[in-house]
Amino acid sequence: MSVKTNCIVLPLALSTGVFLSACGESTSSDSGPDFGKTPAPDTSFNQQALLKNLTDNVITPVFEEFSAISAVQIQAVEAYCEQETAAGLGNATNEQVITAHNEAKVSWRNAMNVWQQAEVMKIGPLSENDSLLRYKIYSWPVVNSCSVDFEVVNFRVGEVNGQPYNIANRTPSRRGLAALEYLLFNEQLNHSCTTSTQPETWNNQTDEYRKVARCEFAAEVARDVNNNAQELLSAWTGTDGYASILKQAGSSNSIFETEHQGVNVISDAMFYLDSFTKDGKIAEPLGLLANTCGAQACPESVESKLSANSLNNIVNNLLGFEKLLTGDDKGTGFVDYLIDVDDKATADAMVADVANAITTTKAYEKSLAETLTADVDRVEQTHSDVKKITDKLKADFINSLALELPTTAAGDND
């Protein structure tokens, strides 16, 4: 048994040319140089059925739901903006504004909950071009509220550096669901910039001016999120979309020489639960990994801090993972593959561990940030619950199915 710290590099040349390093920790059995790289198991298991079910009945419905729910989000945010504008003219009451604002917040939570399931399905269009489309929809862990403050001003003015404003040309940290969270949930109207470069005159504007400016840009961001959701769905389900290519793995019409290679692509996506959920969303705020507070519990480091949606994010990561693992009770899943290669023990254990982690995470009575202060042991237990799943994923699951570890996990021993 060994203990090791692993670091993955997230390519974020999409905004500042910066590469983000995320380090992970864990323990598991040692692995040799050929770990996870053996040929497909000698079995009659129908990998084509696995690919078809996960593509048609698990991944596609999540992408479709996100596209639909992000369209509803536009309506809710625009309705809030109309009430905010009307209030400034004396044509809406404070109660009407609050109601519309709350409905916009609910629409964001609904969209984020679905997106967090899609996060565990980062395949094809969401992984190509250094995951650019994914980051345009959701840039976390790269979040920059000061940049969003500047975008509010740019959108209000209608231009950037002398050119007409076009959100499609702006970098991911200035748009997407993370930016929309800041615009809808941040109660501080002053800008958040702490450097010498700040939005001039912004803090001197009236409260109503700033509220309207923010909600107008929020509506633009919501429209952009939906545009990218539609782009994702088109790239996935189109005539020559990635879903078709994946289902035809092993044929001349696919980029995958074998069905097993296609299966491996989906397996790779499931490792989001390790690097992002376990490490980035739980271990880092706990102080098990470096955070802004040092080696200690840090409420400031949680994902979706302003909306306090952190725990829902984790639950939905687990739900997305569970759907891929089980086939969502609609057909063949990875558990069927494990059972076919005589590893029912791993199949049963992973199903039970995921169900347990979902149940215990849903049972929190306070937000993740609050619990880090009030009951850090409980968060440590959640970390252990998720780690129990990912340890099996990186060892028994990969070995039994002869799948390759993704590049972010290969050679880590964790």
Image (spheres, rainbow, N blue to C red):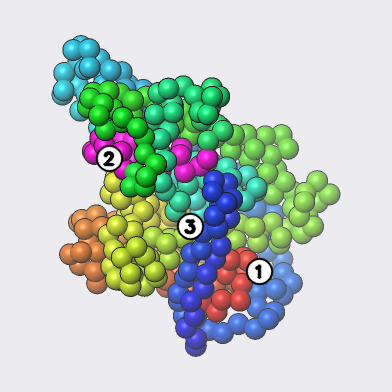
Q: Residue at x 51, y 54 (%)?
A: 120
Residue holding disc 3: 321
**Spatial distance from mark 1 to mark 3, Cα to Cα?**
18 Å
Query: Along the line of sight, which residue is nearer the eye, 109 or 47?
Result: 109
Query: Along the line of sight, which residue is nearer the eye, 105 or 154?
Result: 154
Residue holding disc 1: 404
What percent of the width, then of the height, locates residue 175?
46, 37
Image marks 2 and 3: residues in contact by CB distance under 8 Å: no
Q: Secondary structure at mark 3?
A: helix
Characterize the local packing of mark 3: few (<14), some (14-19) or many (20 or more) Cα atoms within 10 angstroms. many
What percent of the width, then of the height, locates residue 51?
65, 53
Q: Secondary structure at mark 1?
A: loop
| Residue 352 placement: quadrant | bottom left
Image marks 2 and 1: residues in contact by CB distance under 8 Å: no
Characterize the local packing of mark 1: few (<14), some (14-19) or many (20 or more) Cα atoms within 10 angstroms. many
**The disc labelled 3 sits on which kind of residue?**
Phe
Query: Along the line of sight, which residue is nearer the eye, 152 or 363?
Result: 152
